[in-house]
């Protein structure tokens, strides 16, 4: 019985044909064509959200600076380093724009 079971398994094995492999590669390439543009779009959204979060963080640290310095605004964003923030740049490396009269921070 073991010999017939063994013979049945090995005789039913066959390799993929060239057409089957071509169809599988075609399906995979279509899936990649659909997925890659969505990933790049998602990356742009993530960068925008990261910039927004950085602006909000620096803005809140300016408020903390004001509380510690009797309501005075910092002259530049560099005055916040290293006690309040580590970086005053966006996630893509551009420096944030700071208005020292109003204390408002925005992305370039």
Image (cartoon, rainbow, N blue to C red):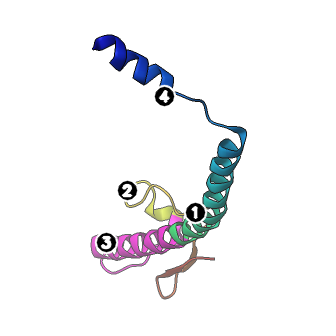
| Labels 1 and 2: the sequence-earlier one | 1
* In the depicted structure, whether residue 11 falls above or below residue 88: above
- The quadrant of the picture occupied by the N terminus is top left
Name the residue tied to disc 2. Answer: 83
Where disc 4 sits, the SS reads helix
Report whether 63 appears left or right of 45.
left
Labels in figure, total: 4
Question: Which circle's residue, 3 or 4, is located before the other in the chain?
Answer: 4
Tell me the tag on residue 12: 4
Q: Secondary structure at mark 3?
A: helix
Who's the residue at 60% across and 30% down the image? 15
Q: Which residues are magenta?
A: 48-77
**Earlier sequence position, callout 3 versus callout 1:** 1
Q: Nearer the viewer, residue 39 or 67?
A: 39
| First reached walking from the N terminus: tag 3 or tag 2 | 3
Distance (Cα) linking label 2 and label 4: 71 Å
Q: Secondary structure at mark 2?
A: loop
- The residue tagged 3 is 64
Q: Is residue 92 above or below residue 104?
A: above
| Residue 48 image offset from top left, x and y in percent | 54, 73
Mark 2 Cα-neighbour bin, 10 Å: few <14, some 14–19, many ≥20: few
């Amino acid at each position: 019985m073991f010999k017939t079971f063994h013979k049945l398994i090995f005789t039913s094995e066959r390799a993929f044909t060239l057409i089957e492999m071509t169809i599988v590669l075609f399906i995979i390439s279509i899936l990649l064509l659909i997925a890659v543009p969505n990933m790049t779009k998602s990356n742009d959204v993530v960068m925008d959200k990261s910039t927004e979060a950085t602006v909000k963080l620096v803005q809140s640290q300016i408020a903390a600076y004001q509380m510690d310095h009797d309501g005075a605004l910092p002259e530049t964003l560099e005055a916040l380093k290293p006690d309040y923030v580590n970086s005053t740049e966006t996630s893509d490396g551009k420096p944030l724009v700071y208005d020292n009269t109003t204390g408002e921070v925005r992305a370039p």
